[in-house]
């Protein structure tokens, strides 16, 4: 279970990094409102995945 928690933490950090990448570079040339929706979705998903992984890791 420890490795599952660590993997989820890394996936959460990757989602947060992807959100920052989309905001600063806008590689697909989206409009600002669509880009904000993608950013908020990735940030929310990343935070949730990270804390679920942290909970699983701390249970051990």
Image (cartoon, helix red, strand yellow):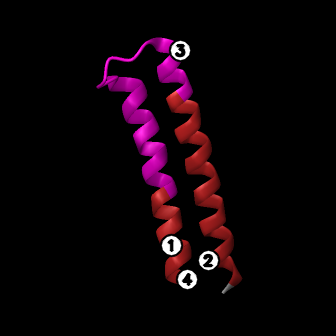
User: Which residue is at 65% across, 64% downward?
Assistant: 52
Return the x and y of residue 33 as percentages of the image width and height. 53, 14
Residue under label 2, please give it.
57
Instruction: Confirm or deny contact between disc 3 and disc 4 (CB under 8 A).
Output: no
Report the residue marked by disc 4: 2
Crowdedness near tag 4: few (<14), some (14–19) or many (≥20) residues, C-alpha within 10 Å: some
Image coordinates of residue 28 in percent, x first then y, are: 31, 24
Graded by Cα atoms within 10 Å as few (under 14), some (14 to 19) or many (20 or more), the crowding at tag 1 reads: some
Q: Nearer the viewer, mark 3 or mark 4?
A: 3
Q: Main secondary structure of the magenta part?
A: helix
| Secondary structure of residue under mark 4 | helix
Q: Which residues are magenta?
A: 12-37
Q: Are marks 4 and 1 in contact (CB under 8 Å)?
A: yes
Q: Quadrant of residue 40?
A: top right
Q: Are marks 4 and 2 in contact (CB under 8 Å)?
A: yes
Find residue 32 and report its horizontal and vertical position in percent. 47, 13
Residue contact between numbered discs 1 and 2, judged by CB atoms under 8 Å: yes
Per the rendering, the mark at residue 33 is: 3
Pick the quarter of the image with the C terminus: bottom right
Residue 53 shown left or right of residue 23 in the figure: right
């Amino acid at each position: 279970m420890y490795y599952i928690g660590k993997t989820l933490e890394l996936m959460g950090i990757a989602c947060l990094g992807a959100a920052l990448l989309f905001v600063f570079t806008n590689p697909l040339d989206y409009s600002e409102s669509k880009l904000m929706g993608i950013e908020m979705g990735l940030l929310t998903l990343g935070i949730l995945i990270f804390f679920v992984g942290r909970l699983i890791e701390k249970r051990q």
